[in-house]
Image (cartoon, rainbow, N blue to C red):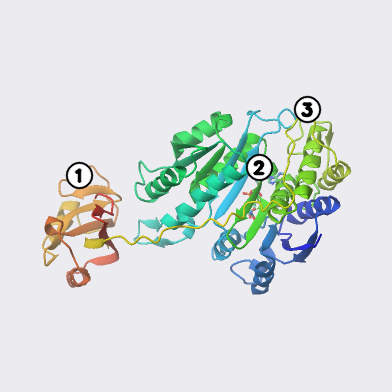
Amino acid sequence: MAKTPITVAKGDGIGPEIMNATLNIILAAGAQLDIEEIEIGEKVYLKGNDAGIEPSAWDSLLRTKVFLKAPITTPQGGGYKSLNVTTRKTLGLYANVRPSVSYHPFVDTKHPVMDVVIVRENEEDTYAGIEYRQTDHVYQCLKLISRPGSEKIVRYAFEYAKHYGRKKVTCFVKDNIMKMTDGIFHKVFDEIATEYPDIVADHWIVDIGSAKLADTPENFDVIVMPNLYGDILSDVAAQIAGSVGLAGSANIGDHCAMFEAIHGSAPRRAGQNLANPSGLLLGAVQMLVHIGQGDIASKVHNAWLKTLEDGIHTYDIFKEGVSSKKVSTSDFAEAIIARIGQMPTKLKAAQYQAGQIGWKLGATAKSDYKADKKLHGVDIYLSWTKGSANDLGAALSKIQAGTVALTGISNRGVKVSPGGLKETFCSDHWRCRYLASDNGVANHKHIIDLLSSFDNSGFEVIKTENLYSFDGEVAYSTL
Ligand code: NAD
């Protein structure tokens, strides 16, 4: 079999130890790999590269398109960009697939029956990383959710479920509050679910959904969610299954893929040959499936399951009375290598097909629809501390452009004028809504005229947001 080129980074902290263990195991099982090593992480950051990755490393990643990555340490202090976020966005890795499985009775868990796969959107949401300090009091982070981004990840989740014979896909969002951003994610979920009649589609508001996931994970199968909820809940899912040290993850795009453990570089455990390499190993198993070496993936996965069953455990999952031997990282790897070819006797054996193309499903978004878009007005944001909400309302009601006039003011999302309560706390951050009368149409000249009047009246405008309708549907939240 021809060797598949892959790019490997050994990372920081426990990274080199768990990567060496992982590579030793998969190569011993017969993985056919042509390994290119790149350097990423702390040393690169400290050399002055704010992304933690050298430009030359991208050449390797773009050539091999497959990245097996150990965790890295992001140095403390400002100015360093998250390497993970950069890699995911640069390579278009839109789907983060995180299986969390419990290995009862061999690994201690409160949830003996758990086999959940979280499919996390990987590029959008608050992870666009667009943040501003706008006033003395207020900081802002933009949450961006797109229809194409939602279509890609939701379709991916259903395709994943179909491919792996899963029965149910659940969507977690908070669209009772974020009616537009989480709302479009939910809407797309409902639309795409109709194309998969054999898979049950289910939905929970993320707060109660999370509580149910933590309480009765056996009721969940595949869960799809936007980036931030997925980030948090995939750690929760891994931890309640047994340990964050046991979960691997795949980051999949249409052209490239990255495989890793979900945990970090655990600097306090570094250099002691103690860490559990299982998360990275299971990431590598996902990689082997992805590159068409499913038979090797099965061998590795089953030898690992047999090792767990035999009670040979690293410190993090070792438990007196359950485990038989506490081992180091390298001894754990040796124990797995010694079991290559063996099958687990109680835990469910892995069975990946040789040549299976894994999760490279070529999901495509279909969002080419163009709506009838009308401008109705503008929200003008001010930094202002010179009086009460009613004082501001009185001053701003004198400013108008054509029929575009003040309809109200809010402060941190609470309407404070007209008709505000004096009990409401007001920060220095005001949203002033100007709309064309009778739902009429505004134009950009109106906005420029308003801004000019604000400036002439001595108001400090910190941002504006245009107010549109799309196909007659109001496309901004109420004041
Ligand atoms: P961490 O995941 O490194 O450690 C959290 C806890 O889990 C620690 O108690 C640690 O001892 C334990 N742990 C983690 N992996 C383990 C393993 N394989 N075996 C045994 N125990 C394990 O999280 P942290 O301490 O918040 O972060 C440390 C560093 O890792 C930070 O610099 C952070 O930025 C980075 N980080 C990197 C990634 C990544 O590269 N993908 C992900 C998360 C955090």
Q: Which residue is mark 1?
A: 422
Q: Amino acid at mark 1?
A: Lys
In-front residue for pair 199/229: 199
Q: Amino acid at mark 3?
A: Val
Q: Residue at 39% across / 46% down in the picture?
A: 187
In the rendering, at what x and y percent does residue 319 appear?
A: 76, 31
In-front residue for pair 390/446: 446
Q: Evaluate whether residue 225 shows in this view.
A: yes
For the residues labelled 3 and 2, the Cα–Cα distance comes to 19 Å
Q: Secondary structure at mark 2?
A: helix
In the rendering, at what x and y percent does residue 275 appear?
A: 76, 46
In the rendering, at what x and y percent does residue 143 appear?
A: 41, 55
In-front residue for pair 63/268: 63
For the residues labelled 3 and 1, the Cα–Cα distance comes to 62 Å
Neighbour tally class for label 2: few under 14, some 14-19, many 20 plus, Cα within 10 Å:
many
Quadrant of residue 384 within the rendered picture:
bottom left
- Given this view, does label 3 or label 1 mark the residue nearer the observer? 3
